[in-house]
């Protein structure tokens, strides 16, 4: 084997996964088609649950050093959500361009000796009972790489997914929009703080501009003139100038376009995330309308769920069926995001009847129960994984923020019945008087007292057979 795991794609999902594998002592390498970092800002936020997961590894502080701002709460189709109702250290979004997250994650890989092979494109893929063969075309020609497993984290047009022939059901886009980073001439009327999208989409004179610093702004626009344009056609400066229409008494003046891209509200999900020795994560597994700021977060959380399970599989320490739980746990989470983004897309249609519906929805979301339900969905704080064959307990399957810098599991208990798993599970004091077993991704997989049945079964299920 050339390596244990090949990760295809050096976006946030692939780089997070490579870090998780490196932390677990698994050899990995990352293939990236592009020859260098683009520096494009792309996604702009970390939701509370993603911030918690970075914090549990000790990775959040250096990310915050690169952040632009903190964004209070969240939104559902532009209607505000209050995150302060949750027991979290991060009742806000971290405002940070995706490029800065990628830079941090890629720099971290040096500690594990994990290479990122830029300018290397996957051009062939085959798997057998013993591993995966990836045909790679790079600056020095085409060659094969052999690994035990391969993960496709190579975006919505994933070559890995297409080579596998995995179904990608859903629907094509019906609405086209443009996102761009632009440099604007100084003007006192330009926004200086981040804000939620317009409450009434399509309202005359409304612009969605987010300041990124040094005169650069994220600009988002759509409209009838965008419909029918091929997604791959270049975005022109004339289009952007025309979209920078007069707003609130001023007209922003364009100086430079840093980058621009078209996107749609297409919504699709891979039928299978686990396909023998080849797995899918991030946009390779699901695409959706970027409403509510969930895309980067969904992919990074895929990686946190998959990393420790795949590492255990590679090291021969996984119980039967552990790797399959990546699909059974994350596929429903992805499906839920697709549902809520499609609903948000409907609520953003600039139509009088839709605006009437938005008014009612805004009233509903102002109630504590509805806010908590939808805010939990958008923030990722409501995720609860099924824990089969485990005694019922309110904490089971829920997140429990705790420091997990080793990437191992954690038993919070006075007694220490984990000696046979000591290389895979750390031990610390009980949680609020209760014993709790936490998986490496921060979710509770057993709770009670050390006399409560099921602890040995849970240790075996999630951390492999006892030594």
Image: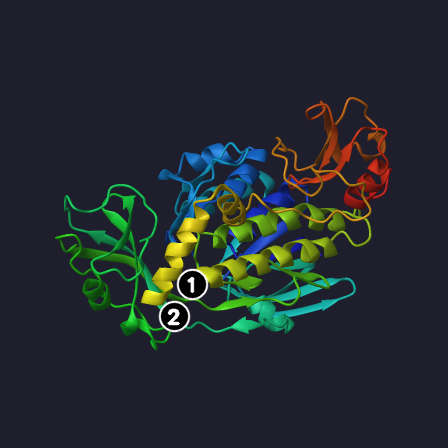
Q: Earlier in the sequence, mark 1 or mark 2?
A: 2
Task: Residue 315: tell me if it is visible.
Answer: yes
Where residue 175 appears, x then y in whole percent? 38, 70
Please tell me which residue lies in front, 299 or 71.
71
* Residue 283 visible somewhere in the drawing: no
Q: Residue placed at 77% from the left, 44% from the top?
A: 462
Mark 2 crowdedness (10 Å alpha carbons): few <14, some 14-19, many ≥20:
some
Q: Badge 1 is on which residue? A: 345
Residue 72, compared with residue 180, is above or below; it is above
Q: Which residue is mark 2?
A: 175
The answer for how far apart the CA atoms under marks 1 and 2 are is 9 Å
- State yes or no: discs 1 and 2 in contact (Cβ < 8 Å): yes
Across and down, in percent, residue 111 comes to 57, 38
Is 312 displayed left or right of 297 in the figure? Answer: right
- Identify whether 124 is placed above or below 117: below
Q: Nearer the viewer, residue 346 or 463?
A: 346
- Rendering coords of residue 157 (x, y %): 51, 68
For disc 1, the neighbor class at 10 Å (few under 14, some 14 to 19, many from 20) is some
Q: Is residue 270 left or right of residue 360?
A: right
């Amino acid at each position: 084997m050339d390596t244990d795991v090949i990760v295809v794609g050096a976006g946030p999902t692939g780089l997070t996964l490579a870090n998780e594998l490196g932390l677990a002592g698994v050899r990995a390498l990352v293939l990236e088609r592009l020859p260098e970092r683009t520096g494009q800002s792309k996604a702009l936020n970390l939701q509370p649950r993603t911030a918690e997961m970075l914090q549990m590894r000790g990775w959040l502080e250096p990310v915050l050093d690169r952040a632009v701002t903190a964004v209070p709460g969240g939104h559902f189709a532009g209607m505000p959500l209050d995150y302060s109702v949750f027991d979290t250290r991060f009742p806000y979004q971290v405002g940070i361009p995706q490029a800065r997250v990628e830079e941090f994650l890629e720099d971290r890989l040096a500690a594990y000796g994990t290479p990122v092979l830029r300018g290397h494109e996957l051009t062939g893929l085959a798997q057998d009972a013993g591993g995966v063969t990836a045909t790679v075309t790079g600056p020095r020609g085409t060659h094969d790489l052999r690994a035990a497993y391969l993960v496709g984290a190579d975006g919505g047009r994933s070559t890995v997914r297409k080579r596998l022939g995995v179904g990608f059901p859903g629907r094509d886009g019906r609405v086209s929009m443009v996102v761009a980073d632009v440099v604007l001439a100084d003007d006192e009327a330009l926004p200086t703080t981040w804000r939620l999208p317009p409450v009434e989409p399509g309202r005359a004179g409304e612009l969605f501009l987010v300041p990124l610093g040094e005169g650069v702004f994220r600009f988002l626009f759509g409209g009838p003139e965008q419909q029918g344009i091929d997604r791959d056609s270049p975005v022109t400066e004339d289009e952007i100038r025309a979209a920078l229409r007069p707003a609130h008494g001023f007209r922003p003046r364009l100086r430079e376009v840093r980058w621009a891209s078209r996107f749609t509200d297409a919504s699709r999900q891979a039928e299978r995330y686990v396909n023998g020795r080849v797995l899918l994560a991030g946009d390779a597994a699901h695409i959706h309308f970027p409403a509510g700021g969930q895309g980067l977060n969904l992919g990074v959380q895929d990686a946190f769920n998959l990393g420790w399970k795949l590492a255990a599989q590679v090291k021969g320490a996984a119980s039967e069926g552990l790797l399959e739980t990546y699909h059974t746990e994350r596929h429903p989470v992805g499906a839920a995001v697709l549902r809520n983004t499609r609903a948000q897309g409907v609520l953003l249609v600039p139509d009088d009847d839709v605006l009437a519906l938005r008014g009612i929805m805004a009233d509903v979301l102002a109630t504590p129960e509805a806010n908590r339900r939808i805010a939990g969905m958008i923030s990722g704080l409501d995720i609860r994984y099924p824990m089969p064959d485990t005694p019922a307990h309110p904490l089971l399957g829920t997140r429990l923020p705790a420091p997990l810098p080793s990437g191992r599991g954690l038993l919070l208990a006075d007694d220490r019945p984990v000696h046979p798993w000591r290389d895979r599970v750390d031990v610390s004091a009980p949680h609020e008087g209760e014993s709790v077993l936490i998986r490496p991704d921060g979710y509770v997989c057993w709770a009670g007292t050390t006399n409560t049945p099921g602890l040995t079964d849970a240790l075996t299920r999630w951390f492999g057979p006892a030594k």
